[in-house]
Amino acid sequence: MRKKLNILFFVVVFTFISFNRTPTYPSYSAEKEGYAIVIDQENTVFDKFIAEHQEAYRLIVVNLKKAGVNNQGSQILKHLKSVYESTPFRYLVFFEKVNYLLSVDEYNSNQFYGKDWTNQPVENITYRSVFPYSRQIHEGSVIQVGIITEDWLKTDWLNQTEISLNMTAPRQFDDYLMHTAKCITYSSHLSDWGEYVKNLKKQAQTKGIPTVLGMEDRSSYQRELSKGDYQLLLEPTTKAIQTNAVSFVCSSLEKIQVNVSKYTVEDFNKHPDYITTHVWRDDDKNQYVDPDGKEITIETIYDMTQKLDSKKRMLIYPIIYPPNHINQFYLTLVNLGEVIPDSKYLRTDSQELKYNYCTVWNEVMAHLIEGKTIGQAVFESYDSFVAKYGEEYYPDSLVIFHTYAQMVIYGPPEMTMQDLAEKARLEILPKEIQETSEIIIPTKETQTEIIIKNTGSATLRYVIAFDENRLELSPSKGSVESGQEVKILLKINKSSVHLFSTLKRKFSVITIQTNAGNKTILVKWNDI
């Protein structure tokens, strides 16, 4: 009997340990940045994604079912905080089946951005954003967060051959007449992306990024800002989105609904499946859109339901209503919020505020063009935005906050615009030079060879900077095709050797500048 009880005790203890084991995660290593992947349960669909990331990152796969964590926003956030303590991560992706949603009570926090948002709550909504996970997992850290869908994982994505930018920028709405009394005219004012996209185009061109701009110039009272590189019609807009790696695509909000007696804009048109432009013909010549909206014509310029090929594209989509179709692009940044901004926040002219809805998205795009990751463009540009506008920002800080808080990235957040294209990869041979960044030329020798090899998929272009008084290099510039290599002859200009001269260690620096990054190498030799 005693023997049977011992066996039973062993079975119970073993069963308890087996089914209540705390999941273990990779130990912290400073050599690689942490990358957390949250899945609802065991799923082989992520195998390829994991294989492509495991060399560059310290992967942390969080299986909610295996970890005993409820698939619910607050529980997931709590678990990720504990995971971060033992193994920090900079990037975080949720599988689409993970219920990361947080209620407004869970979202608002007196620690969030150092401001007590609970004094300005927006009630009865659920945030579809991942923004809290960026700041609330670990104080002082900014984590870049994205969502990965099953369709995305099953797509065999192909690199672009080069990076180019398209910006499609119809006006959001024109100037509606709402009321006139005692020589005072109340109007909606204009909402126009023109000034912003023109400046973004200049910024992109200084970075060597080919850029095209589509704008609407068929309406009454056009400005110079309305002139673009192509007209906002269905065919040229579709071609621009299909043929460029990155598209910043705005859509008209017309026809808007105005309340004449309250002097307010009540609602905007929703176009979840289409990108639209509008043309305003001022038939009565009063320089305002009539409240009934009959002077406005809506035209579709892109169909979001159409199937694209599997080339890597990035879509930046600053509309105020969530779209229905977001899986056609490798990377999509979109607003998925339920908080619709007041019309004064959408205006871009004749207002006291120096910031608005367009300004926020302009900040995001500026970061992307500068070469930041899409995660940095969203989660870090908030800080630069606040720093830029200072105290002017705070009177309407909540609407600014909601604009950022409702942005969601679909796709890997660590990607930059440049990562969409085929890449050259620089390798220096012999390997000792690559590893030590030094070339040592023996005393009795005056020259050596190094090899520049391209292990990437695109052409490698290089230029070598060096001190011509001390060194000779040939060829000092050129290109190397994928899988090929070129030998570089390096000679040192030694002084004439005199009797009883003492040899001394001398050095010079060469810098190999390429489209795949730069490599600085110290050249050492003995001379008098």
Image: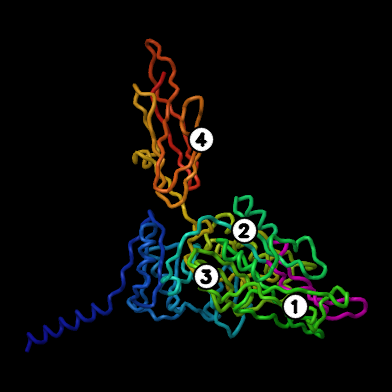
Which quadrant of the view contains residue 156? bottom left
Residue on which the image places disc 1: 297
Which amino acid type corresponds to the residue marked 3 in the rendered image? Leu
Q: Earlier in the sequence, mark 3 or mark 4?
A: 3
Q: Is 43 located above or below residue 502 in the figure?
A: below
Residue that appears at 84% across and 77% down: 186
Q: Earlier in the sequence, mark 4 or mark 2?
A: 2
- Choose mark 1 or mark 2, whichever is in front: 1
Q: Secondary structure at mark 4?
A: strand
Q: Is 84 located above or below residue 263 in the figure?
A: above
Which quadrant of the view contains residue 287? bottom right
Disc on res. 308 = 3
- The image shows residue 475 at horizontal and vertical percentages of 47, 33
Which amino acid type corresponds to the residue marked 1 in the rendered image? Thr
Q: Secondary structure at mark 1?
A: strand
| 185 drawn magenta | yes
- The image shows residue 171 at horizontal and vertical percentages of 72, 70
